[in-house]
Image (cartoon, rainbow, N blue to C red):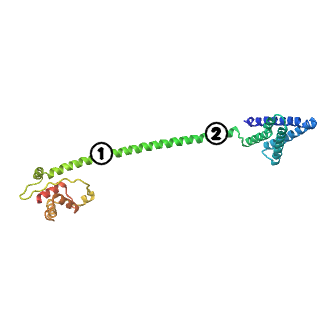
Amino acid sequence: MRAKTVLPAVAMTAVSMVLTLAVLVMWLGTAVPWPVALVVGLGIDGGWLATLAYERRLAAQGDHNTAVSAVGWSFGVLAAGVLVAHALTAEESAGAWLAVAWLPLAAKALWLVHAMWERTALTSVALDAIRGIQQEARDEAAVARARLRAEAATEETRLTAVTEAGARVARVQARTAQTLSSAWSTLETARAGEETGRALTSVTARVTPGVTPRWELPVWGPSEPLAARSLESAPALTDEALDVIVDEIRTSETPALSYREMAARFRAAGHSASEVRLRAAWKRVA
């Protein structure tokens, strides 16, 4: 992994140093003796290489020196300036020389990238630990997503079942109400009919002269059951006492109350008696 950053930097440095030396020898060789041009080129490249070596030593020790870095960048700028000046004064291939003038600065930038890589490099053990932590986090996230999807699907199924059950109950109640309404309408029609009314009246009570008891419709509606404690605490009435109470309630108004009204007032007054005994008492006093 280290070679991926250090090899490009070394290659770029070598190319830029050779190019700088060659340009100085060719360019200054026409004005001064070539050994002098060679010394100038080696001085620029040597100063750059010396500062680079010192920077690498400091980086190996975990240290950094701003002054040394500034000197190194100065040598790089100087080498790039020499190449740019040669390109501008060259009579032929000026564009080609100018195109490679950036190589010293590029080599310096590659060494900077390599130094940053070294400062952030981790061992294989640390990288394996980081990969394990990341994989564990991904596994936990996947399990949490699967759990949430399963819970959402379960809740949707439950709501669907509850809704369907409620709809079925509502349909049954609607059909029951319709059936009861139809039965009540039939009873009301039979009660209101002239012939059927007399027939039903004749079999519901004893026929007495001048009195034609009216056949009452059954009660259809909410009822309030009596508490068991009240039934147990109240003593059972004898037939004579029951007849007296029924007769008092029946004749409390004029005209006399019907059995249905009498039974309702009998219960409301707190008395207790079975439906069979109460109806028998009503027949005796009526």
Q: Residue furthest left?
A: 209
Q: Residue at x 86, y 36 (%)?
A: 23
Closer to us: mark 2 or mark 1? 1
Give the quadrant of the C terminus. bottom left
Q: Residue at x 53, y 41 (%)?
A: 143
Residue 117 tag number: none
Secondary structure under the numbered disc 1 in the rendered image: helix
Secondary structure under the numbered disc 2 in the rendered image: helix
Residue placed under numbered mark 2 in the picture? 131
Query: Answer yes or no: do the residues labelled 2 and 1 have beta carbons within 8 Å?
Result: no
Q: Residue at x 79, y 43 (%)?
A: 59
Horizontally, is 270 left or right of 115 in the view?
left
Horizontally, is 2 left or right of 255 in the view?
right
Q: Quadrant of residue 228?
A: bottom left
Give the quadrant of the N terminus. top right
Give the alpha-carbon distance from disc 2 to disc 1, as whole Å. 61 Å
Count of numbered circles in the view: 2
Q: Nearer the viewer, residue 219 or 276?
A: 219
Residue 249, given in percent of the width and then of the height, sits at 16, 63
Q: Nearer the viewer, residue 172 or 248?
A: 172
Label 2 or label 1, whichever comes before in sequence order: 2
Residue 285, given in percent of the width and then of the height, sits at 11, 60
Q: Quadrant of residue 99?
A: top right
Residue 7, given in percent of the width and then of the height, sits at 77, 35
Q: Amino acid at mark 2?
A: Arg
Residue placed under numbered mark 1 in the picture? 172
